[in-house]
Image (cartoon, helix red, strand yellow):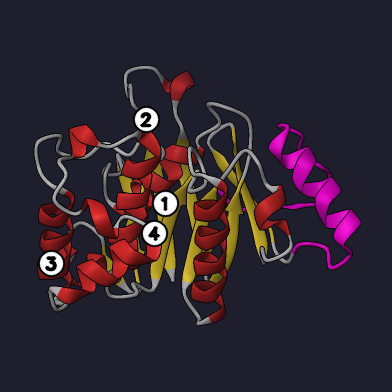
Amino acid sequence: MIRFLGVSFSYRPDRPRETVLAGVDLALPAGLTLVVGPNGCGKSTLLRLAAGVEPPDDGRIEVDGHDLWTAEVAARAGLAFVPEQPDLTPYATVAEILDLVCALRGEPPDSAARALAAVGLDGLAKRSVRELSLGQRRKAMLAAARIGNPGNLLLDEPLESLDRAARAGTLAWIESRHAAGALVLVAAHDVEPFAAAAARALTVRDGRCLLVDPLPGDPAARDRLLERLAGGETPPDVFRLPR
């Protein structure tokens, strides 16, 4: 479980009107949670905070009961983050990056080879990141996320730039992980590939988090609600979390 406890965050703290999150209390259990909403509403920021890329200005974030910033080793051990922009060290090879992930997660080196094969990069392990296309860089990030089967997956636009076969493989992997009891948090503009499997939906409005849990069981009603949330609407019948 990932918890936000009184979390506030702004990229420009001197401008209160630009606050992204304001005193958010949020508990995310296992299963697939879709993070939806228009550009700039705070989807990626929410994932970056949950991943420990950005520290909160106030409050704290816990992963499986461990504070993300005071008990970093324990909190991050079961955490994997695939950002929207797959920025990797350009002169490192794919193999070097995944070997480092294996070492950090205490996994044997052959885990890297299996992860690369799973995303279709097994023949490119010795290439440097700067030699990869955008889609191949995203595959490398997804391969890193597979190592050790972490129980908390934070995926920001995980299907972006992927070819058809890679999209299908990534969707199957995501389904297998949340079916196995993992927490999977997916931020996406295109909600259709994830709608059927999602347990709940989350969006950000004016510094607050809005959670719909559970989503409607009727597929048509679920699709309509997700499209409204993705478009920036705030339906009156959803539950607004405390600030």
Q: Nearer the viewer, mark 1 or mark 4?
A: 4
Q: Which residue is drawn at 66% across and 63% down?
A: 198
- Judged left or right of residue 148, residue 163 is right
Question: How far apart, in angstroms, are the residues tagged by discs 3 and 4?
Answer: 21 Å
Looking at the image, which residue sits at the far front?
123
Q: Residue at x 50, y 35 (%)?
A: 42
Q: Name the residue under label 2.
A: 10
Which element carries disc 1, helix, strand or loop?
A: strand
**Residue 222 image-quadrant placement:** bottom right
| 71 is within the stretch colored magenta | no
**Residue 122 image-quadrant placement:** bottom left
Which element carries disc 2, helix, strand or loop?
A: loop
| 242 is within the stretch colored magenta | yes
Determine if residue 79 is in view: no
Circles 2 and 4: CB distance less than 8 Å? no
Q: Callout 4 environment at 10 Å: few (<14), some (14 to 19), or many (20+)?
A: many
Residue 130 placement (x, y as % from top left): 19, 32
The amino acid type, in three-letter code, at marker 1 is: Gly
Question: How far apart, in angstroms, are the residues tagged by discs 1 and 4?
Answer: 38 Å
Name the one closer to the observer, 171 or 242. 171
Which contiguous range is marked in magenta? 215-243
Q: Which residue is drawn at 50% across and 40% down?
A: 160
Q: Which residue is drawn at 57% across and 70% down?
A: 175
Q: Name the residue under label 1.
A: 6
Circles 3 and 4: CB distance less than 8 Å? no
Q: Name the residue under label 4.
A: 119
Residue 89 placement (x, y as % from top left): 14, 38
Question: How far apart, in angstroms, are the residues tagged by discs 2 and 4?
Answer: 35 Å
Tell which circle, 2 or 4, labels the residue nearer the N-terminal end.
2
Q: In this view, does 241 lie above or below 218?
A: above
